Image (spheres, rainbow, N blue to C red):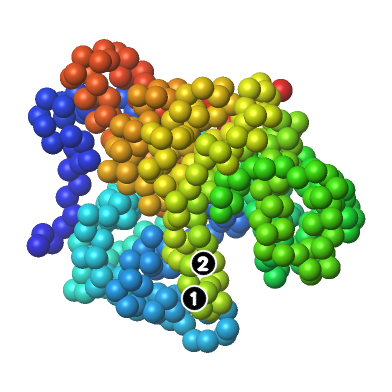
């Protein structure tokens, strides 16, 4: 096993020599383009505080569920990776110990996109080329700690170093946006923008729903005691998000069902939820109705809908109770779009004021449903492969399944979906390499000219994300 990491300049490009030569030329035309990051989960407070990252484990291990879930799958307890227990139980607080456990499990990441991202971060971002292992853990920890103490590695400085032109955070619909206000005062308001995410406010069966609706009422300064007031508060918050620079709303429902209810029926279900009497069927119907209602709101105010259904959240109830959400226990389920979205698209699909970006973790839908939908409805764009599909082979399969029906220009281009800030440039770099390989094949098969491929690569990496989310007056 080598002692140092060697990042091959042609990594993730095609292995066939002729294809690789063409792909290399295409990739070189995109590798230094700015990054447009319009679907992510980096916390805005990170940039507001602009403090040094605490330690290597807090930066690269504990907050990244791609990393922790692999170690957990091999029997490591989440608390031993620094994941805080909600019940007040003990958890590892020594970052060096957490880092050692990660390095001891480095071999587990062979063949995964996490390995690609982590190697890129270590070598390209922090200038460290030692292969993680039990023997090198302390040396890497010390070297990384020294780098993180450098002002050039603070969050705002890294924005420039990474070439991030635009970064969207994802914020609860009831957020005060205080971090974004302070960022605007510092001149970063047009560069770091919020995204409106109302999921928690439409899940009537969630025990915390009423508390979160009360939070909505407080921040919007409106009475949410009835359905009319609830809708008014949501609309008011959307306007606050737009004033803070928001371009999109994010919707992560379990299904894509968009069947609307009559206003009276929706109001009645809302009142039953306020009284704690809502049934599971009523809760599901209300959530579907609200997806349709949010499409109406997006048509009115211009926020682009990001719709990414198909994830069974918190699959292991005990882990959710002990550690909370977003710890790697969200599991994909089979997802249907064609019939589920028909009510929404019947009403808004050809409206020039409506736009939606569809994501999936069920790749069987790419060619069967999503590409045909995007290939005919002018309001629909296909989002980049995300989550478990944000990988070399997942991206290749997406291009092969979707392009012949939807083309390139009915997609959003690449927008990363990450909580791990330092991995953003690695994810964009990987996408640009995979797209270069796919385009090279079309050139070598005489289906595109070299000039067309080069232009398309730039569009996918940079121009299409800006166009898909651009504010329309």
Image point (80%, 43%), residue name: 262
Q: Is residue 163 left or right of residue 143?
A: right
Numbered circles on residues, count: 2
Viewer-proximal residue, 201 or 424? 201
As drawn, 313 above or below 307: below
Picture quadrant of residue 436: top left
Picture quadrant of residue 456: top left
As drawn, 285 above or below 279: above
Q: From where the camera sits, is residue 430 visible?
A: no
Viewer-proximal residue, 244 or 122? 244
Residue 344 is situated, as x and y percent measured from the top left of the image, at 65, 35
Residue 32 is situated, as x and y percent measured from the top left of the image, at 36, 31
Q: Quadrant of the C terminus?
A: top right
Residue position marked by numbered label 2 in the rendering: 314
Q: From where the camera sits, is residue 113 visible?
A: yes
Picture quadrant of residue 470: top right
Residue position marked by numbered label 1 in the rendering: 319
Q: Is residue 10 left or right of residue 240?
A: left
Question: At numbered mark 1, what does the secondary structure look like: helix, strand or loop?
Answer: helix
Q: Are marks 1 and 2 in contact (CB under 8 Å)?
A: yes
Residue 246 is situated, as x and y percent measured from the top left of the image, at 66, 39
As drawn, 449 above or below 10: above
Image point (16%, 58%), residue name: 4
Residue 110 is situated, as x and y percent measured from the top left of the image, at 21, 58
Graded by Cα atoms within 10 Å as few (under 14), some (14 to 19) or many (20 or more), the crowding at tag 2 reads some
Q: Quadrant of the N terminus?
A: bottom left
């Amino acid at each position: 096993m080598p002692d140092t990491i060697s990042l091959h300049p042609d990594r993730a490009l095609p292995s066939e020599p002729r294809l690789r030569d063409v792909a290399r030329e295409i990739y070189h035309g995109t590798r230094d383009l700015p990054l447009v990051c319009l679907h992510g989960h980096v916390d805005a407070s990170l940039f507001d505080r602009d403090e040094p990252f605490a330690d290597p484990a807090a930066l690269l291990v504990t907050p990244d569920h791609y990393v922790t879930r692999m170690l957990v799958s091999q029997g490591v307890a989440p608390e031993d990776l620094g994941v805080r227990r909600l019940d007040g139980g003990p958890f590892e607080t020594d970052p060096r110990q957490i880092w050692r456990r990660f390095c001891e499990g480095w071999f587990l990441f062979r063949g995964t996109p996490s390995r690609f991202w982590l190697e890129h971060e270590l070598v390209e971002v922090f200038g460290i080329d030692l292969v993680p292992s039990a023997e090198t853990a302390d040396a890497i920890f010390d070297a990384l700690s020294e780098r993180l103490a450098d002002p050039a590695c603070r969050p705002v400085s890294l924005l420039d170093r990474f070439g991030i032109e635009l970064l969207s955070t994802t914020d609860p619909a009831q957020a005060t946006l205080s971090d974004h206000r302070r960022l605007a005062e510092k001149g970063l308001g047009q560069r770091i923008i919020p995204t409106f995410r109302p999921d928690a406010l439409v899940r009537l069966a969630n025990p915390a729903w009423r508390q979160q609706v009360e939070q909505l009422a407080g921040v919007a300064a409106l009475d949410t005691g009835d359905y009319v007031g609830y809708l008014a508060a949501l609309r008011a918050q959307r306007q606050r998000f737009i004033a803070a620079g928001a371009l999109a709303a994010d919707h992560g429902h379990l299904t894509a069902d968009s069947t609307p209810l009559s206003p009276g029926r929706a109001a009645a279900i809302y009142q039953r939820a306020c009284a704690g009497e809502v049934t599971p069927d009523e809760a599901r119907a209300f959530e579907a109705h609200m997806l349709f209602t949010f499409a109406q709101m997006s048509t009115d105010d211009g926020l682009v809908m990001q719709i990414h259904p198909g994830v069974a959240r918190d699959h292991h109830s005990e882990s959710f109770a002990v550690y909370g959400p977003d710890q790697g226990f969200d599991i994909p389920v089979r997802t249907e779009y064609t019939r589920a979205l028909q009510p929404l698209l019947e009403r808004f699909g050809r409206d020039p004021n409506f736009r939606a970006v569809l994501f999936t973790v069920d790749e069987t839908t790419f060619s069967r449903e999503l590409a045909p939908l995007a290939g005919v409805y002018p309001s629909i764009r296909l989002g980049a492969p995300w989550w478990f599909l944000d990988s070399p082979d997942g991206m290749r399969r997406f291009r092969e399944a979707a392009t012949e029906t939807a083309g390139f220009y009915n997609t959003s281009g690449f927008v990363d979906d990450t909580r791990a800030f330092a991995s953003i440039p690695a994810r964009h770099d990987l996408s640009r390499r995979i797209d270069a390989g796919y385009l090279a094949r079309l050139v070598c098969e005489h289906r595109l000219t070299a000039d067309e491929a080069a232009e398309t690569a730039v569009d996918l990496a940079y121009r299409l994300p800006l166009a898909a989310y651009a504010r329309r007056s």
